[in-house]
Amino acid sequence: MADAGIFHRLKQDHDSHRQLFAKMADAQDEPDRLEKLFAQFAVEVKAHAAAEEETLYATMLARPDLREDAQHSVSEHKEIEDYLEEMAEQEFNSQPWRETFAQMKKRYLHHIEEEEEEMFPDAAKDLSAQEEEKLGRKFAERKPAELDRAEAEE
């Protein structure tokens, strides 16, 4: 995998999201800091998912042997988005919010682990190094616009 390739870029984002979860855990007793970190996470994960769907998943959906994995991951993105919407309607840091957050975190960590350990290696077998790099460039081009869109929604 080239450093500019799609899988490397996606893994970098996943690592960043894991770091945000760790920072949120450290900020449990600091509601203002927790709220800022959570808002950052929500924007980041929405932008990541949209750019991932527009690049890697779009490519995978066009290939019969990869279509099912892409459909599964798209449905998991929707599930995470549903959790974020539910949390937006709850009082921040309330008991229901914290419970929903814990469920969302568990599902999201499962999702990225599944991508990294199963889906990415399967897709890598079907993509050339040039395709991986091209998708990586497309992702890098797409994500800033998705960040702007996600920030505007918050």
Image (cartoon, rainbow, N blue to C red):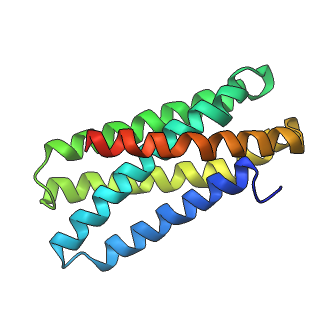
Determine whether 135 is above or below 106 in the image: above
* Quarter of the view holding residue 150: top left
The foreground one among 104 and 140 is: 140
Q: Position of residue 77 (x, y in %)?
A: 47, 38
Question: What residue do we see at 70% from left, 44% from top?
Answer: 137
Does residue 45 appear in this view? yes
- Residue 103 horizontal side relative to residue 127, left or right: left
The foreground one among 19 and 111 is: 19
Determine whether 110 is above or below 69 in the image: below
Question: What residue do we see at 82% from left, 43% from top?
Answer: 124
Q: Quadrant of the N terminus?
A: bottom right
Question: What residue do we see at 56% from left, 65% from top?
Answer: 15
- Residue 148 horizontal side relative to residue 99, left or right: right
Q: Position of residue 135 (x, y in %)?
A: 72, 39
- Residue 6 horizontal side relative to residue 147, left or right: right
The foreground one among 24 and 48 is: 48
Q: Quadrant of the C terminus?
A: top left
- Residue 130 horizontal side relative to residue 94, left or right: right
Q: Position of residue 129 (x, y in %)?
A: 88, 45
Does residue 122 appear in this view? no
The number of numbered badges drawn on the structure is 0
* Quarter of the view holding residue 117: bottom right
Question: What residue do we see at 82% from left, 56% from top?
Answer: 2
Determine whether 134 is above or below 71 in the image: below
